[in-house]
Image (cartoon, rainbow, N blue to C red):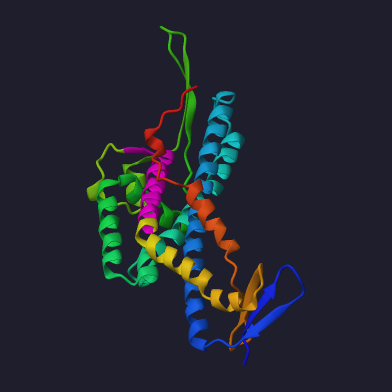
Amino acid sequence: MENLFVYSTDEVAYQSFEVSESEITLALGYRELLVKALDIEIIYDQIIEAYWDYKNKVNYWSLRSVSSPFANYAFNHEVRSSLNRQAFNLFNLSKLYLDWHYNKDKKRCFSFELTKDDGSQQQVIDHREEIYKTNLNYVVGCKLRGHSQHSELPVRTITKGVRYDHDTSNRTAHFNIYYDYEDLVKASVPKDRLFKDIKLDLTEIIDGFVYAISQKHMLNRRLTEVVVGKARASFTSMWQNYATETGFKNYQCEVCTQENKIFGSSLEWFDVFDYLKEKHRNSINYSNITFEK
């Protein structure tokens, strides 16, 4: 049964061939791997965009608070409502990514699923433990994520105002969403990671949390780079001999499976993978960056 169709893109013409089911199965395996590689890039892109949206909104309300430094319950509600939507969205997206990255209970490890390499999975586990030990904001962020999903929204109390320096006549606006020791314990942050007078700002927590996710993503890229490249090259060249036999200068291929599902040989859709890798080239710790006026 003919199940490979090569179409000329220069004229109305095509030729058909019969290819083995093993070849089709192999091609579908390559395609599935590439789809997974693109999907996790898309999820990561959503996280970073949600993070930027949150940061922008914090800056917006910080500016707005200067014109309303005194108690204003309606204004405070709008601030909490806006930032809760942003933070909640960010935490939910991060849950999806982290479950893909590594989840022992669900027996998931993204890099292992692509590489089938136990060493790759061990690197993910070791890296994950290192981040957990060294990045308190990541630990807190993980706990706040679960707390906001099951107990209460992440933004409750806002500290804002304008400080006046009599010596210099300078005014300094401040805008913070603090979590103290009791707040963090309530969110199930391990007590051995805290001290009694600790006070963490939600924006700094999210900075460290997203930075940890970006570190995990860069590791995923490094561990899967070779296998993704091989799958891409193999999928692209699979039907090359058949296409050469047709004599068509420009062509496209379609394959029909036993279930009568059709998939094409073009990987133009995978160009988005390259775009997203370029868009987010590095992991950035924004809490370590000071922006000049």
The front one of 229 and 273 is: 229
Among the 4 quarters of the image, the one containing residue 262: bottom right
- The residue positioned 48% from the left and 51% from the top of the image is 277
Q: Which residues are magenta?
A: 199-220
Q: Position of residue 161 (x, y in %)?
A: 49, 25
Q: How many marks?
A: 0
- The residue positioned 40% from the left and 69% from the top of the image is 114
Query: Can you name the residue that lies furthest to the right here?
Result: 12
Q: Main secondary structure of the magenta part?
A: helix
Q: Is 206 included in the stretch rendered in magenta?
A: yes
Residue 285 vs 162, above or below: the answer is below
Query: Can you name the residue that lies furthest to the top here?
Result: 167
Q: Position of residue 239 (x, y in %)?
A: 55, 76
Q: Position of residue 173 (x, y in %)?
A: 48, 23
Query: Can you name the residue that lies furthest to the bottom here?
Result: 1
- The residue positioned 50% from the left and 83% from the top of the image is 23
Residue 190 appearing in the image: no
- The residue positioned 32% from the left and 69% from the top of the image is 104
